[in-house]
Amino acid sequence: MSMTMGIVVLFVKMLAVLAVLLGMAAYMVLLERKLLGWFQLRPGPNRVGPFGLLQPIADGLKMLLKEDIIPRDAERLLFLIAPALLALTTLLAFAVVPFGPDLVIGGQVIPQVISDLNVGLLMIMALSSIGVYGVALGGWASNSKFSLLGAIRGAAMMISYELPLSLALVPVVMLSGSFSLTDIVNAQQGYPFILVQPLAFALFFVSAMAESKRVPFDMPEAENELMAGFHTEYSGMRFALFFVGEYVNMVLLGALTAVFFLGGWHGPFLPPIVWFLIKIMITPFFLIWTRASLPRLRYDQLMHLCWKVLTPLALLNIIVTGAFMAG
Amino acid sequence: MSDIIAAARGFFRGAKGIADAYLMVLRHLFRKQLTEPYPEFKRELPERTRARIVLTRTPDGDERCVACYLCSGACPVNCISMQSEEREDGRRHAAWFRINFARCIYCGLCEEACPTLAIQLTPDFAFAKDDIMKFVYEKEDLLIEGGGKHPDYDFYKHCGVAFGKAGKGERPGERPPVDVKNNLP
Amino acid sequence: MEITQSAASALNFWEPGALSLAVYGALLVAVMGVILFLSAWLNPTKKSPNKDIPYECGITPTGQARFQYPTPFYLVAAFFLIFDVEAVYVFTWAVSFTRLTWTGWLQISFFIAVLFLSLVYVWRKGGLEWSANPMR
Ligand code: SF4
Ligand code: SF4
């Protein structure tokens, strides 16, 4: 097959991923508002289009037409790039997420993943850490006390949840013997890892909830104490980029949970991509459900949870898993 | 040992608490929604609801306001202004009367202050404008037909002021004025 | 020979490797740039002294908002760095786990035990107490 064809296919693939992601992020906002509405016995947005289905488009247009205000004494450059940094890292992490088995069209193998790096898992970890820079820099640069407090909390949270988040994935790496996400999914051909690693799943999920900066771990943007936390000073499209980052992150966590523990695209009857989408949606639904159910933790409580409960459990889990597998 | 049991009990109590919260919320997904969609369903508001202000008229169709400035003085945000004037028949009224609804906080103090029951707040709360200057209502916009909440009241029937055909103390229910110079013991 | 081959495969667009990652990254940067350019182009900023004040619920802000991070933060950050580096060792062990035997398990168990002990030590020393008066 020719080079040009390869480029075209690559671009089609990327644009499809990007379009689906941004679309999913936009509709995730609608889904969240709808579900929260239903959980609170109200209908949620229902005016723009049938059942409010055009609401994300209206919101996006509104954001695009809003003025972009830069507060006095802000660190201009950092203030300007911070939201893009957050959105960029979360979107970039999707490069290594496989959406299905290799397609074979006309004798040419087309992998359904943008970049099957053999250090995929490490890259996702690294990107999720870099994403915190968006929070910390954005909050610090806006020269507002609320923002700075949000930024400090974001950074303080990151140094707490990263450790259990990565340690919880060690058993998955042990079981599949690879960092590549495609290999990890392939290793779950027979059974999803959640069946053999329920504890690792629980640890990963709690840490991932903290990573998503959502209730009950939404201290960086706790709206009733810090206005909007690190993005208090943001407006217009930059504010929207923070939101894109947050909601793409929800989708990303759904995808990662699906890949690491729920068996990725494997599943009976339905085509792989459908299975994968279904599995992706489980986590966001649960996150929204959590938002409607639980109150917010203090951030020292989160640190205690991460350092004194999750990390020891994760370490223990590694040893026990190793003993079972070696034995 | 008892420590461990207590810790385990605490753990299960906490876990049950969280699970209960989740279940309770999930149950709400399947309950009937309480929302009434607003423009389709309009609730009947009580008569005393405080919203758009009107100037009312006496039973015989004359304007009630005597331009006494009491409402203007009572208004905490100073959004009422007017100019008083005497009509040919000797009755006071407002040459112009202006309420700036962009500033009004609908506190109802003007209504309380008014001795003639002229100024009244109505339940019509939904009047949005695309331009803030359109919120400045003049007398023509404020004056309505009828007496609003108190249709039968007429200040000049009880005021004891000489006006029109009736002099002081000549209206029904009024006593003739006391001659203060003749009031010596 | 091998080098040329790997270079050829690295430049192959069919291959889901580093090249496609780079292209994807460039595409994302371009998309971000377009979005931010569009919003800046559609809404020219209108400066006004009141609008530029940082929002503090209506109170006029005093002083800079660049105070120092609290000290316990540095402590926990140092622990985080140390433990994260150790997590990297655990990861390298985990990826080759299938080829290791009980010996490997014993070695990593010893390593993790040391890690665990140091965590317990830090815990006992009060290094994980964020506030002076924690609720629990
Ligand atoms: S309702 Fe209150 S604020 Fe409005 S005009 Fe009357 S006194 Fe003034
Ligand atoms: S509306 Fe009432 S209070 Fe106001 S000037 Fe007229 S009579 Fe006086």
Image (cartoon, rainbow, N blue to C red):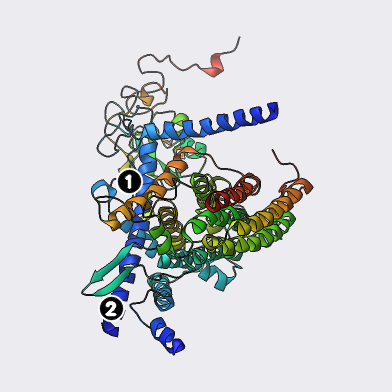
**In front: B20, or A145?**
B20
Q: Quadrant of the rendered structure where residue C2 is? A: bottom left
Horizontal side, residue A46 vs residue A311: left or right: left
Q: Residue at left 79%, top 48%?
A: C125
**Residue bearing mark 2:** A8
Residue B167 pos. (x, y %): 38, 23
- Left or right relative to B21: residue B46: left
Determine whether the residue tagged by mark 2 lies in a helix, strand or loop: helix
Q: Could you say which is closer to the camera, residue A184 or residue A98?
A: A184
Of discs 2 and 1, which sits in the foreground?
2
**Badge 2 or badge 1: first in the primary sequence:** 2
Residue farthest to the left, as pictured = A106
Q: Nearer the viewer, residue A122 or C106?
A: C106
Q: Is residue B16 left or right of residue B10?
A: left
Mark 2 Cα shell of 10 Å, populated few (<14), some (14-19), many (≥20): few
Residue A24 falls in image quadrant: bottom left
Label 1 amino acid?
Pro
Q: Is residue A143 visible?
A: no
> Is residue A36 visible from the viewing direction of this image?
yes
Q: Chain of mark 2?
A: A
The yes-or-no answer for disc 2 within 8 Å of ligand 1 is: no
Instruction: State the residue in front, A155 or C39.
Output: A155
| Image label count | 2
Give me the residue at 31% from left, 51% from top. Answer: A267
Q: Which residue is mark 1?
A: A45
The answer to whether residue B49 is above or below residue A45 is: above
Q: Residue at x 37, y 25 (%)?
A: B156
Tag 2 and tag 1, C-beta contact below 8 Å: no
Q: Quadrant of ligand 2?
A: top left
Secondary structure category for the residue under label 1: loop
Question: Disc 1: which chain?
Answer: A
- Residue B93 position, x and y percent, is 38, 37
